[in-house]
């Protein structure tokens, strides 16, 4: 595999001459997942890693991280929309990578819809528009359903406190 030296050290790209490029949103989700894996201590992270299905054909894993030092191997798949493709892709990854944890990544705007697929992955990550990653355990349907409501409430309470502070300042 050929190493890429860009913003993130340790990201590996597959050895194909043409790298697969996706929509800006999917690229953003993928780069946010790579950053989260680095934050968690993964040193060897590959993007678009080809894995053989067993019939000779290849399946490409959006982000693949090799474990070590107590960290499990992880396969990450990113989705810009919620559809039946989510569960199909999760099943396929579990079949070709049975010893890996499966992480499903969605933009946070899809949190309520992503809740339907909470049981398909070991973790579900929601990525905000500023690249922050919120992690939920697989099966945490309630957490995913209420994610946006809780975030809006938190921001409203923060704004309320800021307004109170400003009012005290100018009284």
Image: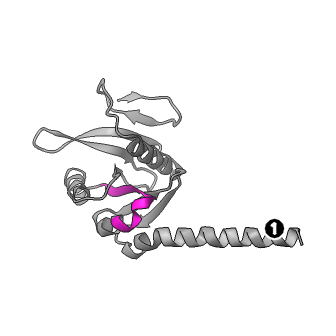
Q: Residue 128: image x %, image y %? A: 50, 55
Classify residue 160 as left or right of residue 20. Answer: right
Dot 1, how many residues are within 10 Å of its Cα: few (below 14), some (14-19), or many (20+)? few
Q: How many marks?
A: 1
Q: Residue at x 34, y 38 (%)?
A: 22
Q: Residue 160: image x %, image y %? A: 70, 72
- Which region of the structure is painted magenta? 100-113
Q: Residue 40: image x %, image y %? A: 50, 53
Toward the top, the furthest residue is 17
Q: Residue at x 30, y 23 (%)?
A: 17
Query: 70 and 136: which one is in front?
Result: 136
Classify residue 61 as left or right of residue 157. Answer: left
Query: 154 and 100: which one is in front?
Result: 154
Residue 26 colored in magenta in the image: no
**Where is the C terminus found, in terms of image quarters?**
bottom right
- For residue 115, what is the image quadrant? bottom left
Q: What element does badge 1 sit on?
A: helix
**Where is the N terminus found, in terms of image quarters?**
top left
Q: Residue at x 40, y 64 (%)?
A: 111
Q: Residue at x 22, y 55 (%)?
A: 85
Q: Which residue is mark 1?
A: 166
């Amino acid at each position: 595999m050929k190493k890429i030296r860009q913003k993130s050290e340790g990201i590996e790209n597959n050895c194909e001459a043409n790298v697969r490029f996706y929509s800006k949103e999917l690229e953003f989700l993928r780069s946010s997942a790579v950053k989260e894996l680095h934050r968690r201590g993964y040193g060897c992270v590959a993007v678009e890693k080809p894995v053989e299905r067993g019939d000779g054909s290849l399946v490409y894993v959006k982000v693949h991280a090799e474990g070590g030092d107590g960290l499990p191997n992880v396969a990450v798949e990113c989705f810009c929309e919620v559809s039946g493709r989510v569960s199909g892709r999760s099943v396929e990854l579990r079949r070709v990578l049975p010893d890996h944890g499966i992480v499903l990544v969605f933009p946070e705007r899809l949190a309520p819809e992503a809740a339907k697929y909470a049981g398909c992955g070991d973790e579900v990550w929601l990525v905000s528009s500023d690249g922050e990653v919120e992690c939920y355990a697989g099966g945490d349907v309630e957490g995913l359903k209420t994610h946006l409501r809780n975030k809006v409430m938190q921001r409203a309470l923060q704004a309320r406190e800021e307004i109170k502070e400003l009012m005290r300042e100018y009284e």
